[in-house]
Image: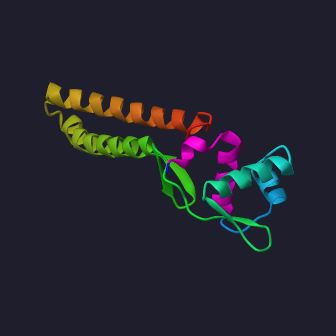
Amino acid sequence: MEPNEDLNASTFQTYMYLVKVGKPVGPRDVMRGADLSSPSVAYRNLQKLVDLGLVIKDEYSNYVVKEKVKMRGYMWFGKTLVPTFIIFGFVFVGMLIAEIAVLIPHLILGSSIEEAFWLWIITTVASALLFLATAVRFRLKPKNHP
């Protein structure tokens, strides 16, 4: 099942609020917490999430997340949905730190540095910037198709 294809921005916002709260809440709480325009919008979103099997309604008419869905291009870290590109970006930042740690003694001692090493550093910087910029773009895009 690919529930993320059925979630519009408002429904996704409702779902993310329910994940972050982590406890049963009613439509009015969802309206306030997810910054929706009315309780009826919250109720429609909640019903859609129930129909998709992502949320359950308890005996007190409160709603709680049944399961966190997997979404292409994202990973869950606790209650936070993070673009996978950010992980790759941080891997390259770590590599860059290691490369600089190797470079500094050579610069201090005045040793020669091969041109290939400079190319390696430039490639690492470019890769880190590319992945981090893509992660920011994923994080800021409208959540019509998360």
Report the side of 132 relative to 20 (left or right).
left
Q: Which residues are magenta?
A: 2-21
Q: Is residue 92 magenta?
A: no
Q: Observer-nearest residue: 45 or 86?
A: 45
Identify the residue at image location x=31%, y=40%: 96
Give the main secondary structure of the magenta stretch.
helix
Image x and y of residue 78, in percent: 53, 61
Identify the residue at image location x=61%, y=54%: 52
Judge whether 36 appears above or below 58 on screen. above
Q: Is residue 18 magenta?
A: yes
Tell me which corner region of the image, top left, top right, bottom left or bottom right, holds residue 108: top left
Tell me which corner region of the image, top left, top right, bottom left or bottom right, holds residue 93: top left
Identify the residue at image location x=56%, y=38%: 145
Report the side of 56 relative to 103 (left or right).
right
Image x and y of residue 33, in percent: 77, 54
Q: Quadrant of the C terminus?
A: top right
Report the side of 131 relative to 55 (left or right).
left
Q: Observer-nearest residue: 54 or 124?
A: 54
Image x and y of residue 14, in percent: 70, 51
Q: Residue furthest bottom?
A: 59
How many numbered marks, from 0 up?
A: 0
